[in-house]
C-alpha cells in the first residue's frame, strides 16, 4: 500500500524499522488545515540509534512521511530507505530544546512576545554553511509601524534563538488521550527572552531581532 494512504491514526504508537533495526516509535504529527503541508511525523528515537546516527542525540525527531514503505504483518512500520538516508534527513533539521524539527514543521508558526502579542509568522529558514542558523519572520503590519522594523525579520540562532516548542492539546491528529505530549501545535508561540525584553521607548529596530525563544 502506498505510504500516502496511511492516516496518522493507523501509524500512531507503531515501532519503526529499517530492515531488522528498530529506529523508534511514531508518536504524532503536526496538525495543519492543509494536509498537503504535513510532510513529517514525530518519532521517539531509540537511544542507541540517536547515539549512532545523530551528531548530538535527540529523543524526538521528524520522520518524513515519504520514507514510510508499509505496515508489516507484525504491525511494525517498514521504511523504504537506509539508516544513512534517515541520518541525512536528520542533519537537515532544526534543534530546539534538545529535539529535532523538520523545516516543514516550523513554517507558519506564530511568533509572540511575553504578553502574548503576535509579532509575526515564520515564513522560511536560512542556512549558514549548510546548517540551519535561524528563521525569517514576516512581521505584522502593526509591529512594523510601531517599532519601525522591516517586513521580514531575520532571526539568528547565535546566541540560540529557537529554544523551546510547547505542546498543544487542541491541534493534533492523534486520539485525545495522546494529544498533549505527542504532537506539535498549529501555531506555537515564541517570546523574547527576559534578557532582551526592554521598553519599546528605548528599543532600537535591531533589538527586535535579538534572541527570542520559542515556546
Image: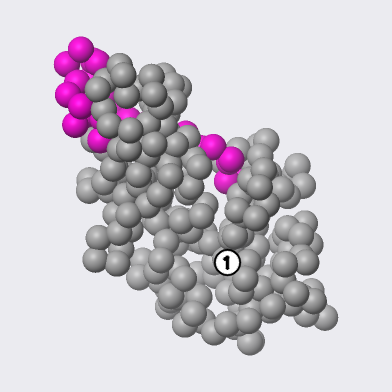
Residue 187: x %, y % from top left = 54, 37
Q: Quadrant of residue 153?
A: top left
* Residue at the right extreme of this rendering: 73
91 displayed left or right of 127: right
Q: Which residue is mark 1?
A: 64
Q: In which image quadrant can residue 69 be found?
A: bottom right
Q: Secondary structure at mark 1?
A: strand
Asked whether the viewer can see residue 62, the reply is yes
The residue at 60%/53% (across/down) is: 37
Q: Of 25 and 33, which appears nearest the observer?
A: 33
Please give left or right for residue 62 compared with residue 124 in the image. right
In front here: 149 or 76?
149
Say which residue appears at 20% left-offset and 12% top-offset.
201
Q: Position of residue 18 (x, y in %)?
A: 61, 82
State the extent of the magenta-drawn residues as a range.
181-209
Answer whether residue 101 is magenta in the image: no
Q: Is residue 36 left or right of residue 152?
A: right
Amino acid at each position: 500500500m502506498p505510504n500516502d494512504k496511511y492516516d496518522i491514526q493507523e501509524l500512531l504508537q507503531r515501532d519503526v524499522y529499517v530492515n531488522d533495526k528498530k529506529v523508534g516509535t511514531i508518536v504524532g504529527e503536526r496538525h495543519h488545515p492543509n494536509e498537503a503541508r504535513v510532510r513529517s511525523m514525530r518519532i521517539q528515537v531509540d537511544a542507541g540509534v540517536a547515539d549512532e546516527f545523530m551528531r548530538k542525540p535527540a529523543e524526538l525527531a521528524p520522520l518524513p512521511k515519504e520514507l514510510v514503505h508499509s505496515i508489516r504483518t507484525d504491525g511494525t512500520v517498514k521504511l523504504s530507505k537506509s539508516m544513512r538516508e534517515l541520518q541525512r534527513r536528520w542533519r537537515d533539521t532544526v534543534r530546539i530544546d534538545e529535539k529535532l524539527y523538520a523545516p516543514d514543521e516550523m513554517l507558519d508558526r506564530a511568533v509572540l512576545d511575553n504578553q502574548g502579542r503576535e509579532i509575526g509568522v515564520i515564513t522560511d529558514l536560512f542556512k549558514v554553511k549548510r546548517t540551519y542558523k535561524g528563521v525569517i519572520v514576516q512581521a505584522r503590519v502593526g509591529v512594523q509601524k510601531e517599532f519601525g522594523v522591516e517586513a521580514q525579520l531575520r532571526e539568528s540562532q547565535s546566541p540560540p534563538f529557537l529554544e523551546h516548542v510547547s505542546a498543544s492539546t487542541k491541534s493534533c491528529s492523534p486520539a485525545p488521550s495522546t494529544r498533549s505530549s505527542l504532537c506539535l501545535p498549529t501555531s506555537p508561540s515564541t517570546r523574547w527572552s527576559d534578557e532582551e525584553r526592554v521598553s519599546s521607548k528605548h528599543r532600537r529596530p535591531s533589538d527586535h531581532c535579538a534572541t527570542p525563544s520559542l515556546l
